[in-house]
Image (spheres, grey):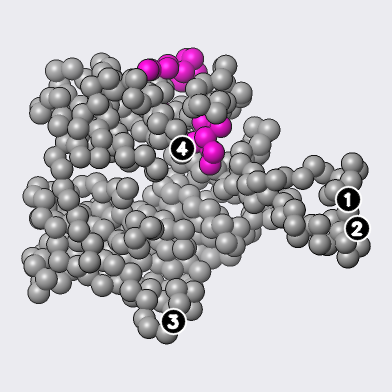
Amino acid sequence: MAVYFDHRIEAPDSSDVPFQLTWHSSLPILAVASSSPATGGKVDLYLQQGEHVESCHVVRPHQPTGLRWHPTKPVLAVGWDNGEVVLLTHPPGDQTVLPGVHTTTIKLLEWSSFGSRLVTGDESGALAVWKVDARGRLHGNHLVKHEYKKPLTCCIFRPSTPGDDVAMLARASVRGDERALDKFSWKGAPLKMGPQEGLGFFICTADGKVHSVDEYCKTSVLLSVEGSIKKLLYIEKTEALAVITENLMLSQYALGPEGGAQEIMKGKLSSKSGQNVDVVWTEDGLLITASGEQVIRLWDLERDDNYVLSLDETLGYERGEMINCVSYCAGKEILAAGTTNGRIAMWRMVVQSGSSRGDTKPQWKLQTPTEIGGNVTQLQSK
């Protein structure tokens, strides 16, 4: 049975109103964006038990609009509503301001899988690609700037690809496989000894277009849907792209090896009308949404199946208690949800005896709630 601890963060100013938070994916550092009528916008870093890192305190007369951690280094990209982008380094608190490319609200920040590139985009449709060195430091000016003329809504990088299996190639060469022999010869392409970072990415605009940007930063229109795109998901197993629009239309597209995309599925995601929808995507191909209802909805895109999880009054939840937000911890296979009554609901994935995760629908067991008070509006798993 898992044991959970709660720690109240030691905020330097209790009057600040926090509105965005994000954990580093591999380090115990929490970034929190907050606002204050007196001083403007702030970004602070905290350690695992809520200790404030005094050296990492950023204040601006503007509001922060985005937080994104480098995948491995303790470097946080912060976007602001005046178009400024700052790289904040923990623990020294060094602040690197990116050269002025943007003049309107920063709408997106995205790192490549190994963190060698950073993409920044703003409300006017300007996008810039930056190179970052192995220590997470900015390397010169931007590599390229594109003008899409429409607000940018989301961005995802293609995942890294595996390197060549040298042992397998050697065995194939002994058997006389010409392609394997070419790999070892000077005529063939150089061997890729380890995972290769994906430098191509997809970018979405408010007019429903998805643009593909290759590793050389050349851009082209990949596909177009009706309505602004809210979420873009890359399904690695099938090399497909899933698109969710603001009116909750879900489409899947098969990506061709030479570019292009073909629609293979389209459907409407159910939700409570007029509510903001929190969307979470898992590596197992599960799409999870919460929209202020008494249930959360799950779509298994691989099996083309959907179902709901609800709260249980016998475990301590209340009648009429609504779910605002969701988060998923892949390492512990736990799904968490925040409620209007100040509770954290957690479901643990249970695999039935004699079966494996690959051949059966996941079974979720609801746990007794964790009480934190207030109205829980945002969750993120560490």
Q: Is residue 274 magenta?
A: no
Residue matched to label 1: 182
- Which portion, as a residue range, is magenta? 94-118
Q: Are marks 2 and 3 in contact (CB under 8 Å)?
A: no
Mark 3 crowdedness (10 Å alpha carbons): few <14, some 14-19, many ≥20: few
The disc at residue 355 is: 3
Label located before the other in sequence (4 or 3): 4
Residue 270, x across and y down, in percent: 33, 64
Q: Is residue 293 above or below residue 50?
A: below
Q: Residue at x 82, y 44 (%)?
A: 189
Residue matched to label 2: 178
Mark 4 crowdedness (10 Å alpha carbons): few <14, some 14-19, many ≥20: some
Q: Amino acid at mark 2?
A: Glu
Q: Are marks 2 and 1 in contact (CB under 8 Å)?
A: yes
Q: Nearer the viewer, residue 285 or 220?
A: 285
Label located before the other in sequence (2 or 3): 2
Mark 1 crowdedness (10 Å alpha carbons): few <14, some 14-19, many ≥20: some
Q: Is residue 73 among what the camera can see?
A: yes
> Marks 1/3: CA distance?
43 Å
Q: Nearer the viewer, residue 284 or 17?
A: 284
Residue 171, x across and y down, in percent: 81, 62
